[in-house]
Image: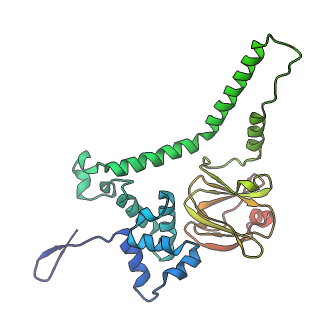
Amino acid sequence: MTETTENNIVEPVVEMTAAEMLRHARTTGRRKREIPTIAKQLCIREEFLTALEEGNYTFIPEVVYILGFARNYAMELGLNPDEVVAKIKREIGLVPDCQAGGDDAAQGDSACAMPDSGRAAGMLVRAKKITLKYWKFALAAAVALVAIVLVAVMLGRGGDSEISAPVDNTAASAAQVASLEPAYNHAVRERFGTENRDNHDVVLQAAQESWVKIEDGRGNTVFSRVLVPGDVYYVPRGDKYKGTFGNAGGIDVWVGGKLAPKVGADHTRKTGISMSPEKLLAGAQ
């Protein structure tokens, strides 16, 4: 991109990086804000926000956290979260620069070649997603293999009628767990709050990236995390819990196996949402 000055000299216009956009939005304008204040509001560690503003993405442990934190930070600062996330993806090599458009996009496949480090990171992310998406099939295959081995052992003993086949507890447990799960709209990626799996009425599943915080009746945080599409969290049973959602429209709320109304619109931050099954189903909030 270029710019013509008064002397008709064409000078290049340098596009800001994602880090520069975040830092500029926070430190300029009428509402200059401090990182500690925003960190408390978003429940994101100060050093992670500082790393985002410095472009030090290696300081944040996983790509999913980098993108999730950046999305919520951008929304808090009034920026376009999709633009910021897209810039970071290009900067860390998850997508080639030419996918964003521009002159380079017309230069052929060689211009769109992703760096080796970016391809490796992208392949790792895709492999992880595929593994998590099809874990049920892997579990079913393992159960079937155990059953085949047990049948072979019984036949090898000559069909002794006094020996009863052992009960496949693994298969029984898997079937029991499956019967308690809602009919999710998205393939399950990862499960959180599994200690509440046998004692819950409400299940949250991310349809979009969203930061979620759950507090008990005393205001103590029992769960705080950026959920990405497919992630599931089992809310402890009881009416005393309240939730905060960084992207309220990006969370599916399941109550007793039924899909409850959304607690807010897309890219809208909602706080103090009661996790009472009755209120969630009624959509009173």
Above or below 122: residue 264: below
Residue 80 percent across, percent down from the top left: 44, 70
Q: Is residue 252 above or below residue 264?
A: above
Query: How far across and down, in percent of the image, does residue 168 sit?
Result: 78, 31
The residue that appears at 57% across and 74% down in the rendered structure is 42
Which residue of the protein is positioned furthest toward the bottom in this rendering?
30
Q: Residue at x 79, y 70 (%)?
A: 240
Check the picture and name the quadrant holding the C terminus.
bottom right
| Colouring style | rainbow
Q: Looking at the image, which residue sits at the far right?
A: 162
Determine whether 171 is above or below 4 in the image: above
Where's the N terminus, which quadrant?
Answer: bottom left
Total numbered badges shown on the rendered structure = 0
Residue at image location 41% in from the left, 50% down from the top: 121
Instruction: Tell me which corner region of the image, top left, top right, bottom left or bottom right, holds residue 174.
Output: top right
Of 242 and 48, which appears nearest the observer? 48
Q: Is residue 81 left or right of residue 177?
A: left
Please give left or right for residue 16 compared with residue 212 in the image. left
The picture places residue 216, in percent across and down from the top left corner, at 75, 71
Residue under the image location 80 percent in, 10 percent down: 158
Q: Quadrant of residue 264?
A: bottom right
